[in-house]
Amino acid sequence: MVLPWAAGGAEGPPARLPLALTALWAAAVGLELAYVLVLGPGPPPLGPLARALQLALAAFQLLNLLGNVGLFLHSDPSIRGVMLAGRGLGRGWAYCYQCQSQVPPRSGHCSACRVCILRRDHHCRLLGCCVGFHNYRPFLCLLLHTAGVLLHVSVLLGPALLALLRAHSPLQATVLLLLPWLMLFTGRVSLVQFALAFVMDTCMAGVLLCGAGLLFHGMLLLRGQTTWEWARGQHHYDLGLCHNLQAALGPRWALVWLWPFLASPLPGDGISFQTSADARTHR
Ligand SMILES: [Zn+2]
Ligand SMILES: [Zn+2]
């Protein structure tokens, strides 16, 4: 049912299968790490100061990762419950037939979330929900800290993988890195050895994916664009470097990367946006 005073999705919330699969993979990485550190060769040898710094870094990364996942999933970027009635018919507004509501500029309907998203960027397949006005900051911080955590995990698992690779011929080591399933099915590695190679492969793939995402979204962030606007070559909301950063991350944009719960309120409401033409007029 669509309430007359607020926009609402015609259907219920989206399925959480992608999120469950991502959580399963994260659990596999965590289990592998625990296995190698506790039952396997253990962590790389370090002095007491370096070990303390490493533990502090791990705690910092983990808190940021979990905090941003929680904020990302908890923030609803959609128009559900947002007061839109009476505000439409201005420049950039449109009517969404699926939501049966006027929707503001920069919003877009997501067929997976089955609702319009404020300042819609894209639908995140790995977490199973859309990235929009209200969860762009945790999304960007997640990219950064996921890459950091996976790099850290790779460094911790590195010596165990290196020992495993040295125990095989160069050809077998290459196949183990590229096609660990093949080595398991042909009986050349045990299930434990396969798990180590598989987890390391996915960690490195994750680092590359997050790094590429961070570069791409960093470029969009500086240009004040969404992915949708970038794909269409639109620059209507580019207010200049500093204002673009503030519009997406709030006034403390330089510090939000360090702590997920740092207060940095967004200047807008996700419904009306200053355009670059407006900014030029006010100068
Ligand atoms: Zn819609
Ligand atoms: Zn979506």
Image: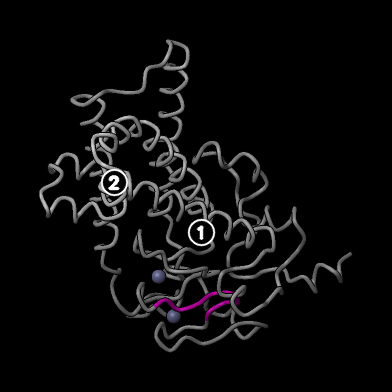
- What x and y, as percent, mark residue 5? 46, 76
Q: For residue 153, which quarter of the picture?
A: top left
Task: Give the answer, above or below, for where 241 lies relative to 41.
Answer: below
Provide residue 211's location: percent of width, then percent of height. Answer: 51, 51
Q: Residues within 10 Å of mark 1 (few under 14, many from 20)?
A: many
The residue lying at 46 percent from left, 27 percent from top is 57
Residue 105 belongs to the span the image colors magenta: yes
Viewer-side residue, 13 vs 58: 58
Would you say the beta carbon of the disc 1 residue lies within 8 angstroms of ligand 2? no
- The residue at which mark 2 appears reads as 26
Query: From this viewpoint, which residue is outermost toward the right?
Result: 283
Mark toward the start of the polypeptide (1 vs 2): 2
Which mark is drawn over residue 134? 1
The relative height of residue 42 versus residue 254 in the rendered view (above or below) is above
Q: Quadrant of residue 15?
A: bottom left
Q: Report the side of 61 relative to 42 (left or right).
A: right
Question: Residue at (30%, 69%) from the top-left corner?
Answer: 14
Count all numbered tags in the image, as a single digit: 2
**In the rendered view, would you say 127 is above or below 37?**
below
Q: Identify the magenta region.
A: 103-110
Q: Nearer the viewer, mark 1 or mark 2?
A: 2
Extreme-top residue of the structure: 48
The residue depicted at 43 percent of the width and 39 percent of the height is 151
